[in-house]
Image: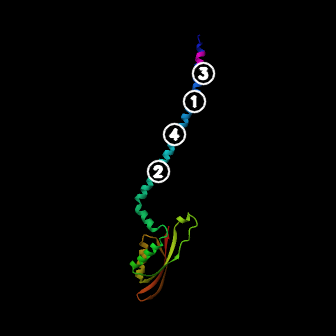
Amino acid sequence: MQVDRPIAIAVILFIILVLIFFLVAPEYSAFGQLQTQLAEKTAEFNAQHDYYAAIDRIHYDLQSHQEDLKKIDDALPQGSTLGNTVYLLQQLAKESGLAVGSIFLSQIPSAPASAQSQNSVRAVVFSISFTGDYMSLERFIISLENSARIFEVSNISFGSQAGPTGSFNLQVKTHLY
């Protein structure tokens, strides 16, 4: 039995086309999908790498500015450190040569309404009574200005002067984070 050559070629070509259609085309489609997934994963990896590189750069910058950040933390302490603030005011007055008569809180921050306002800076006002001379008062105010904490003298009232010493009342505002 002899097969006609053009018919055999046509049958072989048809079989090759059927094999390509059923075997190669699905694999080529899967290969295209895998290439797309690989490109997506590569882009995601590069984005994560850039993100962590940026975090590492920021961390290095923060480490190099650690002393400056410490000064900021000292200037605006977290939480209610009112006892430490009162102690600092007493120590500055003592070093300046003033005698502290009384220190009381004349304005305290209100309770935060939400968690977002809890992270805000709040002002606290102290009223302080002193006895001493004017030079001691000047030294006290200069020491407040030179301290690491943020203090603002909002009101000074002078009492009667009995001899070389007088009485002073100050309102000092400080800030808490």
Three-letter amino acid code at the position of disc 4: Leu
**Residue picked out by circle 3:** 14
**Residue picked out by circle 4:** 38
Q: Position of residue 12 (x, y in %)?
A: 58, 19
For numbered disc 1, what is the local secondary structure? helix
Tell me how far mark 4 sits from mark 3, CA to CA. 35 Å
Q: Position of residue 128 (x, y in %)?
A: 47, 79
Mark 3, other Cα within 10 Å: few <14 / some 14–19 / many ≥20: few
For numbered disc 2, what is the local secondary structure? helix
The residue lying toward the viewer, choosing from 131 and 103, is: 103
Give the quarter of the image for residue 93: bottom left
Magenta span covers which residues?
7-11
Mark 1, other Cα within 10 Å: few <14 / some 14–19 / many ≥20: few
Whichever of callouts 3 and 2 sits on the residue coming sooner in the sequence is: 3
Whichever of callouts 1 and 4 sits on the residue coming sooner in the sequence is: 1
Who's the residue at 52% across and 40% down the image?
A: 39
Whichever of callouts 2 and 1 sits on the residue coming sooner in the sequence is: 1
**Residue picked out by circle 1:** 25
Residue 52's label in the rendered image is 2
The residue lying toward the viewer, choosing from 84 and 147, is: 84
Q: Furthest residue to the bottom? A: 163
Q: Is residue 128 visible?
A: no
